[in-house]
Amino acid sequence: MDRQQTEKDDEASEQGRPTLKTLAFMTGLGVTTVSRALKDAPEIGAETRRRVQLVAKQIGYRPNRAGVRLRTGKTNVISLVLKTEHEIMSFVSDIIYGVSEVIAGTPYHLIVTPYSRSQDPLDPIRYLVETGSADGVIISRTQPNDPRARYMLERGIPFATHGRTDMGLIHPYHDFDNYAFAAEAVRHLAGIGRRRLALLAPPVALTYHRHALNGFTDALSEVGASEIPFNTVSIDHSIEQIRMRTAQVMRRDVRPDGFVSSAAAATLAIVAGIEDAGLKLGRDVDVVSKQSSDLLHLFRRELLVVNEDFRLAGAELARSVLGWIGGAAPGSLQSLSVPTEVLAYRRSTPD
Amino acid sequence: MDRQQTEKDDEASEQGRPTLKTLAFMTGLGVTTVSRALKDAPEIGAETRRRVQLVAKQIGYRPNRAGVRLRTGKTNVISLVLKTEHEIMSFVSDIIYGVSEVIAGTPYHLIVTPYSRSQDPLDPIRYLVETGSADGVIISRTQPNDPRARYMLERGIPFATHGRTDMGLIHPYHDFDNYAFAAEAVRHLAGIGRRRLALLAPPVALTYHRHALNGFTDALSEVGASEIPFNTVSIDHSIEQIRMRTAQVMRRDVRPDGFVSSAAAATLAIVAGIEDAGLKLGRDVDVVSKQSSDLLHLFRRELLVVNEDFRLAGAELARSVLGWIGGAAPGSLQSLSVPTEVLAYRRSTPD
DNA sequence: GTGACAATCTGTAACGTTTCAGGATATAGG
DNA sequence: CCTATATCCTGAAACGTTACAGATTGTCAC
């Protein structure tokens, strides 16, 4: 009797999770054949292929990620790079859910790679690229001239940015149309008689600062309203800073009668500042704000809102990265989310 | 001249990232020696050790994760298992930041493993364990008799729960003391003259439902106040449902003059419901709410709040899991976060 | 001088996968 | 009957790491 098989018997009867070797033993085929059969290689007979796949499914075979990764370099990982500073009413959970939605049912895992304020934003990217820790990367807080995007383009690693760059380089992105948002907001405010408008913009360093600003000023001249400068704060400032600054500007003789706010949390601060100055929302001043969940109307029903869907953003970003990894042209993986119209929950009548 | 070295020369002069082989070539040592030297093994000469470590640092050697994982089974991954349903004002970003904080500077990566409402919560856990995808797991939405905790205990995989179980089994957890929160809230409301209190509790299935409820009822009898039943909704219900239900109960003859709310988003709904019924916060009724970021006082300054720090929770959970992986006793890795006292921003005087 | 022993170091194998370079068999062409 | 070719399958090697089982020194006791 042939006892050279002893080793193989042992291996295959071991308890651990099944490997290609297990499958090979069970089907009586070679490891190579099994590997090929599982990925529908054409040089494997149709019947063999079905047989292998059946057995694999039956015993719940799952390729060992470490094995694949070591051999091929493919990590099956998408990394979401995040700044860990506390953003109040943060949208990152929504982005994560959006990404998750898309990669569920793919072999991809989502890893979250954090960096802190004190760090160079390039650090985590370098780490990921140098250690080959991910097949694709998603970044946010995108800048017009973004060193991270440039770096990844140079190394040829697929990525997508939340927000656009402005370097003449082509890469996948998803962005909310902040130009349209700001412009619509201004038009709406003008439509209800507001003439002196202030913009609480995103931080200057980020690309969408300019988008929002341009939409704001373009619409201002279109409707013939004027701007009250409000650029000493941005939505990155603290609630308290925005609140104080708002109160200050509202106490002036020439004060805004309308605000455009690029973030929901900041809007709370603006409203607080307005009320600190003894003025009333909806009567003395109106505020149009972006929001990512439908909460602002509970806060003050006079608030005017435009919705931004971060879960959608996450999903689009994930789709883009996977698309690039899958070989699609980066230029074809760009999307822009069109704002909803300005929504008024209920306006109190000015008296 | 010895040209048997040709192969080795080639390998070491390749461009890719350095491996043990590269280091071995550069130092003139064997791969095994290098591997040992890097982990301070005692059988390596002190000088050799320093030399290897110096070179490794110089050329920026980083162990290949796939190699380690394949050989040892160690993934250097912590998985955070999350339900992906849209939670408004979600705290998951804070938890993620807290976890990140702790695992920064360790070789660990954080992967987010989602599951959706429709799925068995055990599914993602089974996946992780069966595929050996993580060295440690963090779960939330913990139940008194939690199948996930039981499963992981059986398989011996380190984990920590956000919230406690009640199965007589010992495992690491971090929890906010919701008993103390609810009790304190009741005492505070009683202290300002409120006698008929309603509790908006966490969903019944979760362990901290009972904690909150017990704290609530114990304190009620302690201060001699009475409960207005409000258990047809929980903080898992939609804003609209909570709002409607609040308005209903506030229109009754015998209505609450105080609420204890276990979540900030739900509090917005409660307040909206109160005002729907034509009543005034701070005059007709007071509300004590948990909050995880300091926003509620902007919403209505009459709100009474207790802060819960989810970033801390994330950090503690990460520390617990790492501790367990590191061999600490699970029983020593449990922590309970004591609530801050009830904070009043500013109360309007009842008239 | 020799055996024992400690101190350092090293090669080989293995983890699970895919790729490379074939090998075996059958079919067809001449 | 032999060769060419297509079809289907296979073993060996490699990815980077660690564990195992030595190998090579030098030192010391006797």
Image (cartoon, coloured by chain):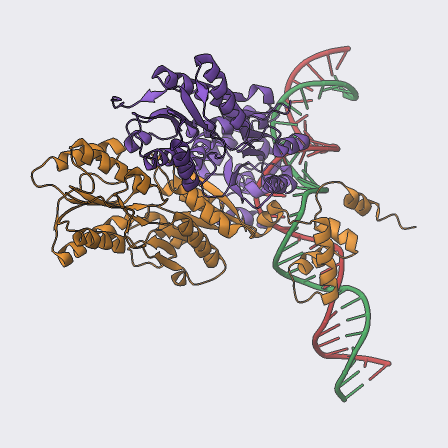
Chain colours: A purple, B orange, C red, D green
Residue B142 is at least partly visible in this image = yes
Residue D12 percent location from the top left of the image: 71, 42
Residue A281 percent location from the top left of the image: 31, 28
Question: Which residue sits furthest left?
Answer: B253
Question: Which residue sits furthest right?
Answer: B1
A325 on left or right of B36 = left
Depth check: A259 or D20 in front?
Answer: A259
Residue at the image position 50 percent from the left and 28 percent from the top: A317
Q: Quadrant of residue B38?
A: bottom right
B342 on left or right of A229 = left
Depth check: B301 or A315 in front?
Answer: B301
Residue A26 percent location from the top left of the image: 52, 39
Residue at the image position 55 percent from the left and 41 percent from the top: A65
Residue B152 percent location from the top left of the image: 40, 51
From what the image shows, is residue A287 above or below residue B226? Answer: above
Residue B214 is at least partly visible in this image = no
Q: Quadrant of the C terminus of chain A?
A: top left
Depth check: A91 or A37 in front?
Answer: A91
Residue at the image position 80 percent from the left and 43 percent from the top: B10
